[in-house]
Image (tube, grey):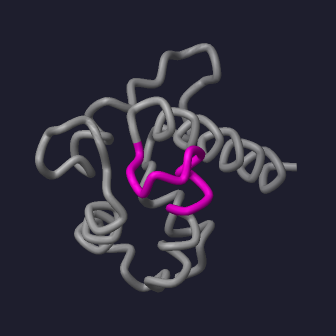
């Protein structure tokens, strides 16, 4: 499974929503935030990716993605960092779908 396919599978219908529709990432964030403290650790992130069936992507790639999302470099993702990542990923996959349709 390549990273594009994994991300598309992970986000499901979110990436195919009309751009005018609201995207609520909170339920997705809560899947990653194991202890409910409002932060996602790298370990939480890796475990959630594996639980969602995307472990085939590879732990090194998942760690690299986490590091890119962790804008302040504190080793934890807060909701704003995660929201920015979700929106970026949504945009990338919507562009990929448009390209596939052309």
Q: Does residue 41 sit above or below 19 in this rendering?
A: below
65 relative to 1, above or below: above
The percent position of residue 61, horizontal first and vertical second, equals 55, 78
Query: Residue 22: x, y in percent?
Result: 49, 16
Residue at 41%, 46% (x, y): give it: 77
Span of residues in magenta = 66-77
Residue 86, position as x, y percentages in the image: 52, 40
Q: What residue is rendered at 88% in x and 49% in y?
A: 102
Position of residue 8 relative to residue 55, above or below, is: above
Q: Residue at x 46, y 24 (%)?
A: 23
Relative to residue 81, is residue 49 drawn left or right? left
Drawn side of residue 101 relative to residue 32, left or right? right
- In the image: residue 15, left or right of residue 74: right
> What is the x, y in percent for residue 24?
39, 24
Number of residue marks: 0
**Residue 69: in magenta span:** yes
């Amino acid at each position: 499974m390549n990273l594009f396919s994994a991300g598309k599978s992970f986000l499901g219908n979110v990436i195919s929503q009309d751009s005018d529709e609201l995207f609520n990432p909170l339920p997705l964030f809560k899947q990653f935030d194991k202890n409910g403290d409002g932060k996602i650790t790298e370990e939480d992130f890796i475990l959630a990716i594996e639980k969602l069936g995307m472990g085939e992507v590879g732990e090194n790639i998942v760690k690299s993605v986490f590091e890119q999302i962790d804008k302040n470099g504190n080793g934890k993702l807060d909701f704003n960092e995660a929201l920015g990542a979700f929106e970026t990923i949504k945009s990338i996959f919507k562009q990929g779908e448009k390209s596939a349709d052309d």
